[in-house]
Image: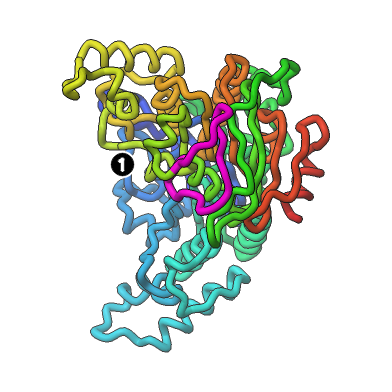
Amino acid sequence: MPSEPLLRLGGVSKAFAGVQALREVSVAINRSEIVCFAGENGSGKSTLIKILAGVVTPDDGAIEVDGRVRPAWQPIDAMRAGIQVIYQDFSLFPNLTVAENISFNHELSQRRMLVRWPEVRRTAQRALNKVGVAIRLDALVEQLSVADKQVVAIARALVQGARLIAMDEPTTALTQREVQALFGVVRRLKADGVAVIFVSHKLPEVFAICERIIVLRNGSKVADGPVGAFDIGSLSQHMIGRRLEQHAGARSHDFGAEVLRVEALGRAGQFDDVSFSLRTGEVLGITGLLGSGRTELANALFGLAPADRGAVVVGGRRVRITSPPDAMRLGIGYVPADRLTEGLFLPQSIGRNIVVSNLETVSDAAGILYGARMRALIDEWVRRLHVFTQDADLPASSLSGGNQQRLMLARWLARTPRILILNGPTVGVDVGSKAEIHAIIARLASDGMGVIVISDDIPELLAACDRILVMQSGRVTEQVARSAVDEDSLAARLAG
């Protein structure tokens, strides 16, 4: 390996509106190296990635590529230097084919009047061959799985001469099998001399794929070393600045009365013959791979896509749930899997996101809102769930991932539901926020709420749940007590 790093940042600092995002951060990335940027939400990882990509200009510090200082650094400079970032949305054209997406920028760079379609296909196929994945070149990207979209984004980067690829939370929506396939692609990139920056909150994955870990906390670099110098405990401590308390999964208290019973519930083409019960004070986990029907079941229980057969019993009474208002009147709350597109009104204020599901408590019979009631409700739940913000009038988009998730919880807890359904409650949040959300779930159950946690995160299921249902192909295939399984046996059940 050459002694000169591919990329070096020296003493980089950046502030936004008086908030210091980075403080004199220095990092070096070598050729053919897999490096993790680790840190809580708000630690500065995203800002650092955007500086690498030329999207954000640092206030101070130097950027070197191949040993040469680059005083002006724009996105086009990063692309020409072979630095590519694959963001969580992949930035693909959903209505174009795989070949067109992979070759699009390459074709633009040729400055030709006409597109040479055979060359488009050859270029795309060569790139897919490099990552060792077979995808139909004429398939529309909108029809692809998340894993295949990610491969298309990687192939596109290679066509543009990528020497360093930064992947932002690349495994968030992938199954365990797809994660392993992605790791194979990453190792192939390394073997071809490409450096990879891997950003993830899933610490076991960090240890499985990365060679070096750089830890950021509050905008500063606090650790940098080979992966062997860390374990999950020490890495967590570097990230959050304190030792993370370990919470036992199953609790010893007795559960109360049955609050929900589902009998042979089904929806055509999505799930069928699903039966289970939930008691007050219980945390029930529902797991399965993508496509197992777990999210469709949650949508049915909340009335987003109602079941067309079977029965739902709430509090001993058979009910029909055909819409979210039906579910809300029955005391059911739902935090969806994608808080950004399904859960939050990002441009609206933090406060409005809390009161939007509680308008009847802050208004009179004519629907006129009382400002004092709104403010009291907002202040109470910002305080109770520790939503860290300087001002509840700021947009929800200003919050970190963990705080956005707490905001979603605050919205529903303000309604004091009897049943709370959490779909992927800690997706995309950092290790500290994850532990806090698990503690909130345990506290809600201890206070007598019935909680359903839908997740394919095995450590999360074992940490948070008392009982776990496994779904495959739209059916519940097994029910296990938390005490009867470990990570390996639950993973085997998920794989089928």
Residue at the image position 47 percent from the left and 41 percent from the top: 320
Measuring from the top left, give residue 254's x and y in whole percent: 72, 17
Query: As rendered, which of 67 and 377 lies closer to the eye?
Result: 377
Q: Is residue 65 left or right of residue 148?
A: left
Q: Amino acid at mark 1?
A: Thr
Residue 356 in view, yes or no:
yes
Label 1: which residue? 57
Provide the residue span drawn in magenta: 302-321
Residue found at the very far front of the displayed protein: 317
Q: With respect to residue 365, does 104 lie above or below?
A: below
Q: Quadrant of the C terminus?
A: bottom right
Query: As rendered, which of 266 and 147 lies closer to the eye?
Result: 266
Query: As rendered, which of 395 and 251 lies closer to the eye?
Result: 251
Q: Quadrant of the N terminus?
A: bottom right
Query: As rendered, which of 309 and 79 lies closer to the eye?
Result: 309
Q: With respect to residue 119, does 100 lie above or below?
A: above
Measuring from the top left, give residue 206's x and y in whole percent: 64, 42
Asked whether residue 209 is drawn in magenta, I would say: no
Q: With respect to residue 434, does 114 lie above or below?
A: below
Residue at the image position 32 percent from the left and 78 percent from the top: 110
Neighbours of disc 1 within 10 Å: few (<14), some (14-19), many (20+)? some
Asked whether residue 309 is drawn in magenta, I would say: yes
Residue at the image position 83 percent from the left and 34 percent from the top: 484
Measuring from the top left, give residue 117's x and y in whole percent: 38, 86
Measuring from the top left, give residue 274's x and y in whole percent: 64, 48
